[in-house]
Image (cartoon, helix red, strand yellow):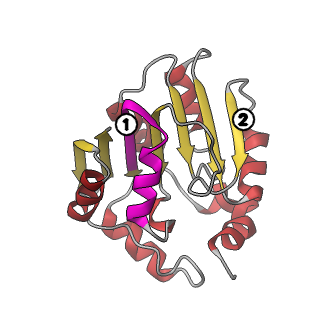
Amino acid sequence: MSSNKDYFNSKAELWDNIVDHDLKKVQRIIDLVEIKKGDKILDVGTGTGVLIPVLQACVGDQGQITAIDIAEKMIEVAKRKFDYSNVEFVVGDVLEKGVSDSDFDCIICYSMFPHFEDKKAAISTLAKHLKKNGKLVICHSQSRDAINHLHQEIPGPVQEDRLPSMDILKQMFESADINVSLEIDDEELFVIIGLL
């Protein structure tokens, strides 16, 4: 595989069978974010849309979800699974004009942040798409060690992808003028939430 995009495209049809997302943990993470009815959400690296039904329940019919992924095959699977009128699916790189809006209430990077090559630039770019007091969330339903070990064991382009330490992420948030409001880094979860 020559790239992350190729890797995830090659896995898209089997993804939901080979990757286990603990939906209780996912719900717990989203509860911590405190999304409100009518919020406008950007789901970065949506994959097959794991977060979409949970986010939909939070924002209601008056909210909006933009689900973006670089892998078109992942988006195809997500579209087949979820048919909500207020979910827009986008194939593209969020860091390269994949999204034109700059007024999201919340941007969530669930189980995908290690795949950004330049993580500091990613946080800075994502911050530009937030409303004032908008939230940036980087989260995993596993520990940082588990995520990094998993990637290390996978041959191919994601083998070197790592989730930075909480301290490093906090520094990156601060340099993008995002104030960290919550952090969890334990054996169950990895969550950092910041307010612009």
Residue sitting at x 46%, y 52%: 125
44 lies above or below 31: below
Q: CA distance from mark 1 to mark 2?
A: 24 Å
Q: Mark 2 — residue?
A: 82
Q: Mark 1 — residue?
A: 135
The quarter holding residue 134 reads top left
> From this viewpoint, is residue 73 visible?
yes
User: What residue range appears in magenta?
Assistant: 119-138
Q: Amino acid at mark 2?
A: Phe
Mark 1 and mark 2 lie on one chain; the one further toward the N terminus is 2
Residue sitting at x 32%, y 51%: 176
> From this viewpoint, is residue 22 visible?
no
Lateral position of residue 188 relative to residue 81, left or right:
left
Residue sitting at x 31%, y 69%: 145
Q: Nearer the viewer, mark 1 or mark 2?
A: 1
Q: Amino acid at mark 1?
A: Lys
Magenta residue check for 121: yes
Residue sitting at x 71%, y 45%: 90
Give the image location of residue 143, x and y in percent.
Answer: 32, 61
